[in-house]
Image (spheres, grey):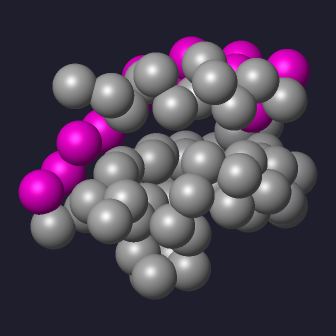
Amino acid sequence: MMSFEINVALKGKHLFATHPRSMQSIFEVARVYKVIREKFPASQGFNISLTENPEIFYGADMKEVDKAIMANDTDALSKLFSR
């Protein structure tokens, strides 16, 4: 089972994280990420990271994640986490 976690930091300090059970598909990741990106912009000092199966910690390049999600390209997003 795939599970994902989004972490939000403010000026380098952890602020909060979603729970892995909150997102168990690429489609759910895209939906939640868009909301978090809008509410917690980098221009205000926020940093967003995304990991698959957080207990194992498979991270992804957030520039590529952002590009894929904002283009509604779930295939590209899924490939970022394939091994």
Q: Quadrant of the C terminus?
A: top left
Q: Which residues are magenta?
A: 56-71
Seen in the picture, residue 39 relative to 74 is either above or below; the reply is below
Residue at 63 percent across and 24 percent down: it is: 75
Q: Position of residue 72 (x, y in %)?
A: 84, 29
Q: Is residue 18 magenta?
A: no
Q: Residue furthest front?
A: 1
Q: Residue furthest left?
A: 56
Q: How many marks?
A: 0
Left/right of residue 6 with respect to residue 77 in the rendered view: left
Residue at 56 percent across and 69 percent down: it is: 23
* Quarter occupied by residue 53: bottom left
Residue at 46 percent across and 46 percent down: it is: 49
Q: Position of residue 77 (x, y in %)?
A: 58, 28
Left/right of residue 6 with respect to residue 74 in the rendered view: left
Task: Determine if residue 11 is in view.
Answer: no
Seen in the picture, residue 44 relative to 74 is either above or below; the reply is below
Q: Position of residue 33 (x, y in %)?
A: 71, 53
Task: Determine if residue 48 is in view.
Answer: yes
Left/right of residue 71 with respect to residue 45 in the rendered view: right
